[in-house]
């Protein structure tokens, strides 16, 4: 381990009490060996007095002193001391740090304030309290913030949304509780430090919340692509392989969707369904069957409103209501939005935390009343990497599907889901049309 002890030691013990309170007797229980260890570590630290009887241990070397801003802990130490009864002169507080390596050259330092009191000639620790931890880059000596992990606010929004989705997943929350979950603040800005990074996960400590959620641990597999200052994540490429993603909007519909599912199963094709909330609410079992069959799902709003015509608050409410319906049926929040009519605008989208999945090939299946034109239109406009728009609510679409799949297979296409096509690290504020084909809203 390259960390040779900053001297930010959790247990400070008697030496400091002697220094702070002057002349108190060392408790008998303190072993000499521990004392030696502490002395050694303490040579690496510097005691800073930040108030009367408040001391903070900071690293001795100039570069690493920046890791700990001693003044930051003055208020917390004073408040901890106040909670201890007795004459102010009898009390002293020390803020010390324990550290653990978390990821590469990052460490997390956890400050602890300890209050000592002189009682009848003896000095005793009477209070101990952990304070909010800090992440530090041991190489540069700088604080690690959200900006150390990711390049921009869209990545931050994506991570926050995934944190929310994970916090609520399969918890059977009511719509009111979901709303409380949405009010939780995870990473509030690029300066946020309320997280712990490990090689395989990012743990976020949200602000106090009614659901009493203290931390959310996000697996790196869910968010690696958003931490794009640490990880190089490439969009999927398919080489010479011809892939397309079939998408179905406006369901699930009890009359038509089961046949679509049957055809997909027979053809061994996985697709992506963008469901409207009122249909999910009416047919929760069918929504679950879609997921159980291995297809991806996203939201298509609650009742198919044109979001671009709504103000940001109304657009978000529409998305949230739809999410509630999916959460009720599936136990999870959707992570993709297909905006009805493909209608987006930058103003409303600043409030919606989901990526917008558009399409490149429009089957126009709602326009016609027979399957043949649907098959020929798709075949005339398809290209490798494209997202194909269909609807699982029209009989002509259901009838066309077997031939759509067969003709595309004959052309050498294989079928993938939207996340397989685009990669799973999609960003809010971005609209996606196909592989390598996306742009900001
Ligand atoms: Ni639609």
Image (cartoon, helix red, strand yellow):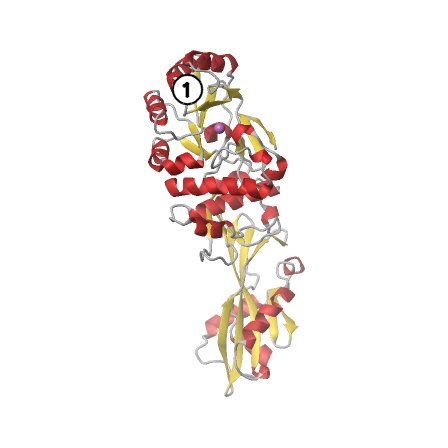
Q: Secondary structure at mark 1?
A: helix
Q: Residue furthest right?
A: 62
Judge whether 9 appears above or below 230 on screen. Answer: below
Q: Is residue 221 left or right of residue 134?
A: left
- In this picture, residue 190 sits left or right of residue 421: right
Q: Quadrant of the C terminus?
A: top right
Q: Number of callouts in the render?
A: 1
Which of the two residues, 40 or 105, is positioned nearer the viewer here? 105
Q: Position of residue 384 (x, y in %)?
A: 50, 19
**Residue at x 50%, y 88% (from the top left corner):** 120
Question: Is 6 situated above or below 166?
Answer: below
Q: Nearer the viewer, residue 182 or 163?
A: 182
* Above or below: residue 386 compared with residue 185: above
Expressed as whole percent of the image width and height from the top left, the position of residue 197 reads: 51, 49
Decide if residue 214 is in sight here: yes
Viewer-proximal residue, 243 or 120? 243
Q: Image check: 87 left or right of 303?
A: right
Q: Position of residue 236 (x, y in %)?
A: 51, 28
In the figure, is residue 17 to the left or right of 321?
A: right
Q: Position of residue 400 (x, y in %)?
A: 40, 16
Mark 1 Cβ inside 8 Å of ligand 1:
no
Closest to the observer, 204 or 310: 310
Residue furthest toward the bottom? 120
Q: Quadrant of residue 266?
A: top left
Looking at the rendering, which quadrant does residue 58 occupy?
bottom right
Badge 1, how many Cα within 10 Å: few under 14, some, many 20+? Answer: many
Residue 229 shows in the view: no
Q: Which residue is mark 1?
A: 397
């Amino acid at each position: 381990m390259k960390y040779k002890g900053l001297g930010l030691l959790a247990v400070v013990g008697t030496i400091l009490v002697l220094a702070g309170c002057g002349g108190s007797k060392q408790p008998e229980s303190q072993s000499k060996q521990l004392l030696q260890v502490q002395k050694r570590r303490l040579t690496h630290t510097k005691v800073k007095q930040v108030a009367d009887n408040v001391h903070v241990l900071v690293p001795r070397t100039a570069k690493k002193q920046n890791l700990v801003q001693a003044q930051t802990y003055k208020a917390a130490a004073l408040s901890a001391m106040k909670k201890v009864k007795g004459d102010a002169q009898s009390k002293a507080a020390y803020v010390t740090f324990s550290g653990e390596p978390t990821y590469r050259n990052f460490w997390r330092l956890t400050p602890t304030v300890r209050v000592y009191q002189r009682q009848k000639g003896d000095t005793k620790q009477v209070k101990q309290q952990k304070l909010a931890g800090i992440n530090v880059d041991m190489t540069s000596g700088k604080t690690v913030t959200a900006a150390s992990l990711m390049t921009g606010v869209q990545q931050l929004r994506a991570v926050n949304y995934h944190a929310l989705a994970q916090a609520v997943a399969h918890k059977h929350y009511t719509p009111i509780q979901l709303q409380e979950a949405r009010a939780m603040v995870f990473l509030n800005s690029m300066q946020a430090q309320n997280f712990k990074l490990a090689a395989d996960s990012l743990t976020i400590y949200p602000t106090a919340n009614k659901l009493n959620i203290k931390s959310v641990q996000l697996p790196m597999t869910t968010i690696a692509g958003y931490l794009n200052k640490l990880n190089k994540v490439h969009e999927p490429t398919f080489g010479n392989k011809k892939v397309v993603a079939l998408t179905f909007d406006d369901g699930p519909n009890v009359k038509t969707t089961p046949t679509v599912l049957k055809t997909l199963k027979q053809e061994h094709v996985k697709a992506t369904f963008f469901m409207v909330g009122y249909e999910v609410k009416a047919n929760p079992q069918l929504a679950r069957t879609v997921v159980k069959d291995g297809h991806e799902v996203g939201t298509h709003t609650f009742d198919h409103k044109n979001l671009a015509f709504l103000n940001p608050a109304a657009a978000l409410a529409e998305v949230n209501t739809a999410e509630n319906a999916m959460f009720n049926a599936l136990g999870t929040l959707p992570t993709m939005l297909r905006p009805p009519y493909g209608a987006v605008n930058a103003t409303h989208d600043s409030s919606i935390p989901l990526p917008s999945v558009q399409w490149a090939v429009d089957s126009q299946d709602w326009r016609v009343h027979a399957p043949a034109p649907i098959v020929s239109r798709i075949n005339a406009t398809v290209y490798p990497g494209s997202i194909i728009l269909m609807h699982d609510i029209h009989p002509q679409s259901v009838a066309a599907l077997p031939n759509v799949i067969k003709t595309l297979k004959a052309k050498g296409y294989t079928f993938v889901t939207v996340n397989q096509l685009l990669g799973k690290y999609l960003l809010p504020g971005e609209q996606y049309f196909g592989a390598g084909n996306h742009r900001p809203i």
